[in-house]
Structure formats: C-alpha cells, structure tokens
Amino acid sequence: MKILLANPRGFCAGVNMAIESLELALKLFGTPIYVYHEIVHNKYVVEHFHNQGVVFVSDLEEVPAGAVLLYSAHGVSPAIRQAAAQRKLRPVDATCPLVTKVHLEAIRYAKAGYTIILIGHEGHDEVIGTMGEAPEAIVLVESPEDVARLEVADTAKLAYLTQTTLSVDDATRIINALRARFPQIASPPTEDICYATQNRQEAVRLLAREADAVLVFGSQNSSNSQRLAELAREVNVPAYLIDSAAEIRPEWFDGSETLVVTAGASAPEVVVQEGIDLLRERYGAEVEVRIVREENVHFQLPKELRTATAGASA
C-alpha cells in the first residue's frame, strides 16, 4: 500500500489557539475550568481535557458563580455572554478570529437594516452563535432548495454570510442560487469560509483522484471533517471518517494500492500518526507526503490570558 499523506491536514490556527488557551488556563487557574460546549469538535481532544479536570457544559447553570469559563473556538451568542456576566463568571474567549469576523459582519448588516441569509448547518455551534447576534434579522439556508422557498420583505437590503467550515462547492451552489434569485444581494468583503477549510478540501479534491480510498481522521460531529469525506465520495472514491486507528477495518482496503490520509481541522496529529503506524504494520505501507498548500497562520491568545500571564510574571 502507498499512502499519500495530505498536507495541509489537521489543526488549523483557530483550533491551535483554542487548545493552547485551554492548556494555559489550566496552568494559570487550575481545575476545575469550565468550557461552554466542546472546545473543538473532536472526541480525542475533549477526552484528553476531560481527564485533566476540564468540565464541558451545555448550560451555564452548571457553572458555579465566579468560575473560569472558556468559550470554544466556535463562538457564542451575546445572550451567553450576558448570562455569564450575570453569574459573575470569569470568561476566556477562545473564539476563532475567523468566526468573530462573521459575527461582526452580521452585526454590521443588521444595524444597516439588512435581512441576512446565513448559509450553514442548523444546530451547529457556530451557526447558533452567529444567529444569536441578530436573531430577528437572520434566516438560515442549508441548500439551493431552501433559497427557492425564501420569502424576503425587502430584496433591496439583502446580504449573505456563511458558516466558516462549509464545503466550498456546496456553499458556491447556494451562493449562485441566491445571486440568481436576488442579483443585488450583498456579500462580505472577503469570503467567510476559512482558509484551512478550503486548503484541506483542495488537498482531498486533488489527491483523491489518484487513490483507491480516502481515510479522514476526525469526529462525526466535525463539520469540516465530514466535508472532506464527502468530497472524496463525490469523485467516486470510498472515504471513511474515523476518530482513531482502532476504527480501521481491513475490508476497506481490499485491493487498495493507494490511500489518501488526511485529517479535519480539529483532529490532532497524534491520531494520524497512530493510524499510519498501524497501516505500516498491517500492510507494509509506504508514505509519500504531498504538499498542496503551505500554511503559516497564527492567532494570538485571548486577551484575558495575555493579561493573566503578564500579571503572573510581574
């Protein structure tokens, strides 16, 4: 077996920042530390922090007054921030800056009186947070069919935004449907789908055509990981989304000579390497690293942690 190891893969700058934030918060404040929802959508990462004493919550009522509360990379709504303030919690905002960008765009359009069409997946943490910025002004669409059913009072003041982790192809189809129906619709100055999501999708799109199968490391509730598997299947290549090497099944590779291995933006490199080690042992796999795009993006830690670190070292 030959493995084409996709690069870039795995952690993006936003995920790196969120994980580094939680690691530093543990050092500065000790346990327990509370995180609103999962820090990132990855089973391995969540279990790793749970074992260190981090408590993941879906309701702020679960957080004792005065406790440290970290907001995940997916962002939260203003209502959550207000509730945290009322409970006198000590927030650490690890929202990905690219998600914050979408929130700010939603606020700007809403203040200008626009109806905002948000392209995304209902129930996703990021979508919930973005819609919370201007719930009366935002309408969610998930498909071109949803666009056909839209009813908008003032088509002259209409704008669209997108969830950052969408499939580029899916988003483009929906945007094209919006522009066909509403030619004057406004769009953000720069597109919302994040650089890392696009780069990982580009790598799979290019490499899958050379492969018999694609193995994606990531969790089932990770939107960007799901999109990688879907992209491979769109070009008729079998694709499998797994959390760890333990889920690898021999029947997936009957007759497979070339396998693409990649990882979603919230999947740690350690699980990728464990998978490769198993494939080497079981199939004598040889690895060829394929660099499709270079990434050199870094986001600074939240100001709450920078301030606390400065105070601790003073």
Image (tube, grey):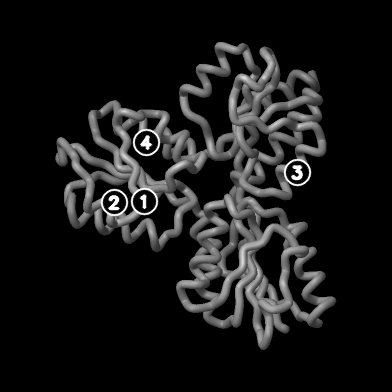
Q: Residue at x 47, y 22 (%)?
A: 79
Q: Is label 4 in a helix, a strand or a loop?
A: helix
Q: Residues within 10 Å of mark 4 (few under 14, many from 20)?
A: many
Q: Secondary structure at mark 2?
A: helix
**Amino acid type, mark 4:** Glu
Q: Position of residue 143 (x, y in %)?
A: 33, 55
Is 54 rendered above or below residue 264? Answer: above
- x 73%, y 26%: residue: 33
* Placement of 66 over or under 182, stated as above or below: above
Give residue 55's position: percent from left, percent from top: 72, 30
- Disc 4 and disc 1 in contact, CB within 8 angstroms: no
Q: Are marks 2 and 3 in contact (CB under 8 Å)?
A: no
Amino acid type of disc 2?
A: Asp
Residue 146 — which label?
2
- Label 1 vs label 3: CA separation? 31 Å
User: In this figure, which residue is indicated by the disc labeled 1?
Assistant: 142
What residue did someone put label 4 on? 105
Q: Position of residue 246 (x, y in %)?
A: 77, 63
Tell me: residue 180, above or below residue 163: below
230 to the left or right of 173: right
